[in-house]
Each structure stands twice: as C-alpha cells, then as structure tokens.
Image: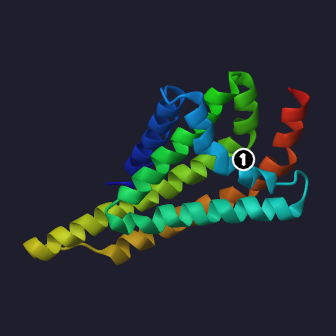
Amino acid sequence: MKLKTYIAVSAATLILGIIAGLETTTPAQEARQLIEPLRELAKQYMPYTIQTVTLIFTKNLVAVMVMWLSGTLLTIPTIASLALNGYIIGIVMALTGNPVKALIAILPHGVIELPAVTIAGACGLRIGVEAARKIASIITHGKASMTKAFKETIKPMIISITLLIPAAIIEVYVTPTLIAIFK
C-alpha cells in the first residue's frame, strides 16, 4: 500500500476519535476528570515564552515518535493513540459548549499540528503492517522488510516533526491572543 492509503486511515481514525469525543455520553464530571491531566499540563504553559514553545514541541515530538515507532507492535498502539488524541479533542470541544471558541483554540495551530500527527500515525501504520507481514513471512517463508518500511517513513517523519515547530510557535504566540480576543 502507498503511504497515501495509510494517511487516509490515520486521518479517519483521528476524525472518528473526534466524533466519538463530541458524541460521548460520558457525564460532564467524568469527562472533566479525563482531561484534568491536560489542565495540569496547561498550567505549566506560559504564553509568549520560548520555554513554552520548547515544552510543547518536545511533548508533541515524543508523541509522534511514539506513534511512529510503536507501529512495530502491529499498529495497535498507533491506532489507539490516534483515536485517543481525537477523542480528547472531541471532549474538549464538547465541554467548551461553544463550538466557535473551541475552534479558535484548536485551529490556528491545529491546521499544522493535526496533519503532523496524521502523517506520524500513517508512518506507524506502515511500520505495523510491515511487522505483521514479517511475522507472516516467517510462517510462510515469504518476504517482508522492516528496513524498507522504516526507510520509506523517514522522509514523512521529518516532515511531521518539522511541522511541529511552527505549530508550537503558533500555539504559544497566536492561539492565546485569539482566545483573549474572542473571550
């Protein structure tokens, strides 16, 4: 399969997670508890500082690298991570009670960050499918190449990681300003 197919599956998984979060029947109190760790993390973010840009970039870098490399576990962690990220976005949007405010908080950096996450997810899926093929090839004496799969995903991962830089900058310098304007 071409990487485009994996990108489509990755995006669909993320979108389904968002829809699930928006449509959750989880009571508001339980949903708030689910995202409480995010609030604690957000308290560390000081808008308009390079330290916060570095913190957000590092957090997102770890997330996309884990998504990519955990694909070796037959795609399960990658799919779970994509769905969970989408679910959290959906819950946060649902809890704001104001779709416009939620979009203002997510879209400025999200238009860059979400494609980066989708690309990393696609790379993890590609690795996972190849890992499954490798296991099958041991049984059937066929051929599969994890090395080739990793090589095919390096360039897209560089793109994904590069996209995280402007996303972090926008999240720290633009998003707080827009939230304040549209309060």
Q: Is residue 142 above or below residue 80?
A: below
Side (left or right) of 20 relative to 38: left
Using the rendered view, name the quadrant where residue 108 is placed: top right
Quadrant into which the N terminus falls: bottom left
* Image coords of residue 89 (percent x, y): 60, 39
The residue at which mark 1 appears reads as 39
Q: Using the rendered image of the protein, determine whether residue 139 is visible from the camera's viewpoint.
A: yes
Q: Residue at x 76, y 32 (%)?
A: 104
Q: Residue 177 location, x and y as percent?
A: 89, 39
The quadrant of the rendering that contains the C terminus is top right
**Element on which disc 1 rests:** helix
Instruction: Determine whether, in the image, residue 138 is placed left or right of residue 33.
Output: left
Which residue shows up at 67% across the image and 43% down it? Answer: 110
Residue with the most extreme front position: 29
Residue at screen point 47% across, 38% down: 17
Determine the image quadrant of residue 132.
Answer: bottom left
Question: 93 or 144, which lies in front?
Answer: 93
Farthest left residue?
Answer: 140
